[in-house]
Structures are given as C-alpha cells and as structure tokens.
Amino acid sequence: MKTYVIFAAALAFGSAIRASDTLDIYVVDTEGGKAIIVLTPDGETMLVDAGYPTEDDRDTKRVVEAARSAGISRFDYVVATHYDADHSGNVPSVDRLIPGRVFVDHGDPMPNYDAGNRSRYYDPYIKAIAGRKRMSVQPGDVIPIKGCRVTVVSAGGKVISQPLSGGGEPNAFAPASRPGTPDGSENAGSVGLLYEFGKFRMLDLADLLSTVEYDLACPRNLIGSVDLFMVSHHGLNVSNARFLVHALRPKVILMNNGASKGGAPETLDILKSSPGLQDLWQLHYSIAGGDMNAAAEFIANPAEPCGAKLFKVTVQRSGAFTVTNTRNNVSRTYPAK
C-alpha cells in the first residue's frame, strides 16, 4: 500500500476554514449522475464526480452552489471515479469555477471505452487538469486528505488483495460462482472508496459492477461492516449484489438515483432487506421502484420537476452521524456502534 505525499508548498492552495470537528458530506442531486462534496474538520475538501455536462450547466450550478454554501472556494482533491458522462464528464466545467488542486482517477481508460466517449469526456478532462498534480490510483492506495482516511478499494477493474481492518471474515451470502464476466467497461473500472472518520465507516463504489463486487466480497468480505453505504450505480440491478450489500450490514443506505434512472425494484428489495438496516434515503422517488421506494420523508426529490434538493451527512468522531433531507429538514441521528 502506498500513500501519496503532497509537498507543503502545494498545501497553501486554499480550502475551507472549519469551526467544527465534524466530517461533512453533501450528496448533490444530479438526477441520476453523481456529485459528492466532502469537507473534513481540518478544512480540506474533496469533490467526487461532478454530474452531467449540459448546455444549461445544470449540474455545474448545483455543485458550485452547494460548495459555496459550505464555504468552499477550492477543492483539495477532485476524484473522477470513471470517465462516463454522468460522473467525470462535468469536471472541467466545475473546475473553471471552483478549481481543484489534485486530481484522482484510475489512469488510462478501460479497454472497452469507445473513441467517441474518449473525445467527448476523457480528453477534455485531461486537458482541463494539465499542469496540476494527477494521482492515478491503485487498490490499497490512500488519498492523503487531512482529517479523514480515504482508502481506494477498487480501481481499473481490480480490488484490494488483502482484507482491511475489520474485514476478512467468510461471507455467508457468497454465491458459488461469479455472476457474469468482467467486461472491461468504465463502470467496472470505477474508483471505489472507503471513508473512515473516528469509528465511522462509509463505502462508495461509484458504478462498480457485481462482477467486480464479487472480488471484494467473496469468498471473504474484505471490507467488513460499514455504517453508511452509498448505493452503487444509481441503484441499477447490475450492481449492488445481495452478496455484497448484506455482507456489509450497513446501518444506513443512501441512493443517488434519478426519477427514471436507477432505483430498480430488484435493487430496492436487496437494500431494504439488508440485515441491520435502519433507514434507506433516496435522492429521487423511483418511478420504476413503485411501492418499494423509501418512506416519503426520506426522499429528497419526490416529484418532477425536480427541486434539486440534496442530503447532508454530518459525522461525529464517536461514529454517530446525522442525515438531513434539505427538502423538508427531516434529520435522523444514528448512534455509534
């Protein structure tokens, strides 16, 4: 395992000033894309993906508004989990307004990444970050953000080879064989991250497919249990396999779906039946999900047109954390284990 070191001179490139000792996580609504903002108690910041690139700059405006509301004028780290439009395609647009210092990705595009997407999304990303530090990470690397430990558990179609602290137990939910064959897509190459702050643990695997989830969870669960699971791939049923979700035993699950993207009934069934689950929160009411959707107070955007409401997660060092729905100010605090 290697940890990247950033020279002291670069650290002067500003981030937010903190007055609290919490880890704050903002899950921005990009209507079936992804954008998460992380603010540590040390005042360092990270943007994970940036939503869709659109002519009206819809997701740029949403990310920038959320960041500025949190007092953020620069991102210390910007993670492009993979090079699809709904994740890293909008990084250059956000970067023009809130610049990044260090850019994190999985390196070269995956083998099945087509030339059209390369010219539309990957090449503009590389052009936008030119002249600044780029970290192309491998499983086991640690992103050196101050105030929170962030470990790369998947990248480029590979996963960690050894269990993390708290992991390594046989997985009672493991199937007899891998579900399908890894396909060399950008989804399969997703940068997956485990966040640890005090006793709190959060897993976010971006759009990782079940064919790669298998290597994280079977026959041993290399991650262990988590407090918060960010649903993979917007809740599509080619990710979020039962053998992974149920082995993680998340206390809380948060899904960044769109009204008509993700939130598949099969996935919602797996999520809601996970052992020990207390609550499921959704960015959107899933039209496909029907009666399987979360309770109405736990949905940030229950109807169209979308209100662009986000979730805020506030984490204490004890491991206790609070999820707040900004649509209705419903908050729920989950005690430490």
Image: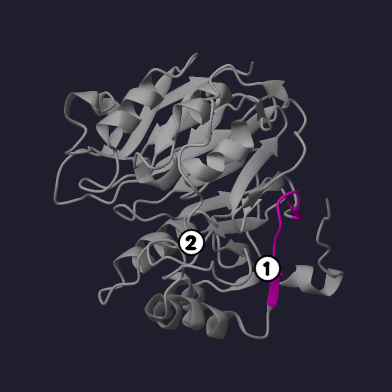
**Hey, which quadrant is residue 238 in on the image?**
top left
Q: Is residue 137 magenta?
A: yes
What secondary structure is marked by label 1? loop
Disc marking residue 137: none
Q: Which residue occupies the foreground of this view, 290 or 41?
A: 290
- Tell me which residue sits at (36%, 45%) in the image: 234
Crowd class of label 2 (few under 14; some 14 to 19; many from 20; radius 10 Å): many
Q: Are marks 2 and 1 in contact (CB under 8 Å)?
A: no
Residue sitting at the far left: 304
The three-letter code of the residue at mark 1 reads Gly
* Up-down relation of residue 16 to residue 223 (above or below): below
Tell me where residue 155 appears, x and y as whole percent: 62, 55
* Residue at 33% from the left image edge and 56% from the top image edge: 30
**Magenta residues, start to end:** 133-144
Residue beneath the point at 48% across and 67% down: 83
Mark linked to residue 14: 1
Which is more N-terminal, label 1 or label 2? 1
Q: Position of residue 224 (x, y in %)?
A: 66, 26
Q: Which residue is mark 2?
A: 186
Q: Amino acid at mark 2?
A: Glu
Q: Is residue 325 left or right of residue 73?
A: left
